[in-house]
Image (cartoon, helix red, strand yellow):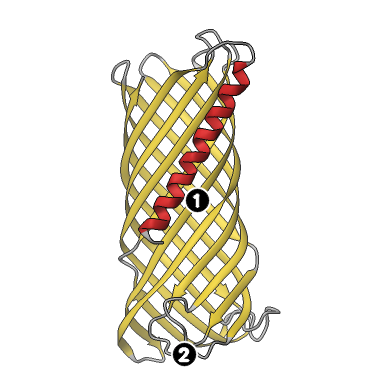
Amino acid sequence: MTFKIRLFLIRNILLIFIIISTCLSSSYADDRTPLFIKRADIGFSTGLRNDDLDWNKAGNIEGNNPTVLSELTWSNLEIWQLGLDSKFEVSRNDYDLLGFFMGFKFDYGQIFHGKNTDSDYLGDNRTNQFSRITSNSDDGDVLDISLFFGPNLTFNNPRYSIVPLIGYSYHEQNLTLTDAYIEIPPIGSYPGLDSRYETEWKGPWLGVYFESLIGETLKVSAQIEYHWADYSAVADWNLREEFQHPRSFDHQADGSGVLLDFNIDYLLSKNWQIGLQGTYQDWETDAGTERVYLTDGTVLSTRLNEVNWDSVSIGLKLICSF
């Protein structure tokens, strides 16, 4: 995705965030009580992330001839990631037991290591393999943006907080393939490979956030989310002369995902915290469609069987509270 498109996306998500805030303010305005931010946490994080992504397609649109014609797997994608995580508790006064919890999360990562395997088959159920190519995927980047809000339930105990959440998220992986090595047939190194596969996962989600203060200096929090996603991807296969460039083929499918986030924070002072953050994501799609664009203008369609993506990350955070 180009920088201009990313900027447009971020700007519009922030606009949605402002609109939600305005609507919440209006809901309080009826009783003439001003709305204010009761608490704000702005966190900056950095850490390592590991992703795996794979997809496979059939030989025709019905899912046959064969059932799996081609399968690509990106494995052990090692990513250095930076993040911004903001959470706001909005209320009418210090004694208001039902405030609103809003947040915005932004993560960007640079891929520095990874491998890809491209396997092709003539028989059903991954039989009669006639091609296997391995390549490097040590470039590219990832992007994650999420916006969410919900009612903050304290149950008369300020040391505990449970927040049912509703949100919208956008995720992308911009993956590369270079340095091809053909294992089947046994040809060896093959020069010139510089292909790309760029994905987008976007859609609404529901979740729950839990926070607990242990003692006076330790805070534990967790968040679980279930996502509904529209999946799309576009590829540029640079060595295939019969394909158009830069759009050689694209993918479309409906998907879903689960995200688990866990944090342990140590309160250095009233305004500063340091913490450890761990995140796990597991995404998959239903069957979808692949469209191949040939240089003569022909568009061929076949069945995209599935796409799978899982991700694990761990990082350090510095949080400013006010």
Q: Quadrant of residue 168?
A: top right
Residue at 50% x, 59% y: name it.
200
Rounded to the nearest whole Å, what is the CA distance between mark 1 and mark 2? 32 Å
Tell me where residue 211 appears, x and y as whole percent. Answer: 49, 25
- Find disc 1 in the rendering and name its residue: 170
Task: Pick the quarter of the image with the N terminus.
Answer: bottom left
Q: Secondary structure at mark 2?
A: loop
Name the N-terminal-most of marks 1 and 2.
1
209 is higher (above) or lower (below) than 61: above
Tell me where residue 18 appears, x and y as whole percent. Answer: 50, 34
Is 76 in front, or is 102? Answer: 102
Q: How many marks?
A: 2
230 is higher (above) or lower (below) than 243: above
Circles 1 and 2, Cβ within 8 Å, touching? The answer is no
Q: Residue furthest right?
A: 62
Residue at 53% x, 52% y: name it.
282
Q: Secondary structure at mark 1?
A: strand
Task: Pick the quarter of the image with the C terminus.
Answer: top left
- Find disc 2 in the rendering and name its residue: 242
| Residue 244 visible (yes or no) | yes
Residue at 42% x, 80% y: name it.
245
Residue at 51% x, 30% y: name it.
102
Q: Amino acid at mark 1?
A: Tyr
Question: Badge 1: how crowded within 10 Å, few (<14), some, or many (20+)?
Answer: many
Tell me where residue 188 appears, x and y as whole percent. Answer: 32, 88
| Residue 209 visible (yes or no) | no
Q: Amino acid at mark 2?
A: Glu
Tell me where residue 264 appears, x and y as whole percent. Answer: 39, 30
